[in-house]
Image (tube, helix red, strand yellow):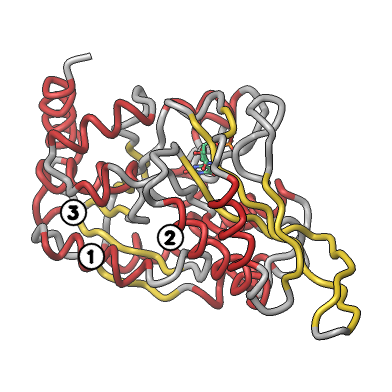
Amino acid sequence: MDYQQFIDAQIAEFKKTVGSALAINALSGGVDSSVVTALAHRALGDQLKTFFIDSGLMRRDEPQRVVRIFADMKIPVALIDARAEFLAALKGLTDPEEKRNAITNTFYAQVFARLVKQTGAKFLLHGTILTDIEETVAGIKRQHNILSQVGIDTQQAYGYAVLEPLKTLRKDGVREVGKLLKLPDEITHRIPFPGPALATRIVGEVTQERLDTVRAATAIVEEELADSDAFQYFAVLLNDRATGIRNNKREFGQIIVVRCIESTDARTAETTRLDWKKLDRICQRIIQIKGVNRCLYDLTAKPPATIEYV
Ligand code: XMP
């Protein structure tokens, strides 16, 4: 595909569809939503308002970091604090699809609907990519941002139209477009991070405490594997506990799984053969996290596993 042609066509399409109206989009700092932000900002300028929704499910320091990167590109991003809203929506939920639905609902029916009302926007722009659509339609996993493809009429359900400029691309294509749009390497080279964020890496209920645990583990894994060249790497908090000993006392502790995979488009994935010393170092650091006494490395390919746990 000629990606420059793709960019030109999308810019023309945005101008035609949005006309003189206002559009909004939510930036998560991931490659997909960053590319949508840069692309639409080129097409619409001030007619686009970009928000970063702090769901409380993000990685450490993520909201401030993303706002800064885009400020450097002269794209203003407003930070919305929705942490309490998301935690309340997830309270008591353990089923993966119920958790995903709660997040979708909080984003679209609550937060975005409110922002659309406040700004008077007619359109919401989305970073949906082809893989998201295929997996949702195939019934593998309900991606948080799939709406029309599962029969949701957003105009009727939420009061706004959704535009999905990246829906014909896969991850590798999105990265190419990002490079042409001159997004910094720290965005285009970034490992994928799902919209439902750390909630996809907490098996069982998402609580503040469990979020803090997986956030701390994620920071360690990302730091240790930054130079690994792997497609994606992260930490997962299991819903089980295991017996351990700490300071000569029995401890029934938390279990963290480390996942590191090779892939080009996230449709299939192989486990990275990490160096033993590296794995050992990650384990030594993870078991320093309060309440965690076991660290496992996941060897499973996709399929049969998916990349995320929820
Ligand atoms: P799975 O877990 O389905 O993940 O093998 C495939 C790729 O997609 C990411 N992922 C998501 N991205 N919304 C997103 O924007 C989601 O709901 C979602 N679920 C998974 C995942 O990180 C991997 O790169």
Q: Which label is found at residue 223?
A: 2
**Quadrant of the image for the N terminus?**
top left
Q: What residue lies at 56% left-to-right and 51% top-to-bottom?
A: 277
Q: Which type of secondary structure does the marked residue at label 1 adopt?
A: strand
Image location (x, y in percent) of residue 177 = 21, 32
**Residue 310 visible here:** no
Of badges 2 and 3, nearer the viewer stands 2
**Residue 285 visible here:** yes
Of badges 1 and 3, nearer the viewer stands 1
Which of pointers 1 and 3 lies earlier in the amino acid sequence? 3
Check the image and report above or below for 194 versus 204: above
Quadrant in the picture for residue 241: bottom right
Distance between mark 1 and mark 3 Cα atoms: 10 Å
Which of pointers 2 and 3 lies earlier in the amino acid sequence? 3
**Nearest the eye: 114 or 36:** 36
Please state if 297 lies on the left or on the right of 195 as rendered: right
Ligand 1 within 8 angstroms of badge 1 C-beta? no
Q: What residue lies at 51% left-to-right and 64% top-to-bottom?
A: 220
Quadrant in the picture for residue 238: bottom right
Q: Which type of secondary structure does the marked residue at label 3 adopt?
A: strand
Amino acid type, mark 3: Leu
Can you identify the residue that label 1 sits on? 77
Q: Say if mark 1 contacts mark 3, CB within 8 Å.
A: no
Amino acid type, mark 2: Glu
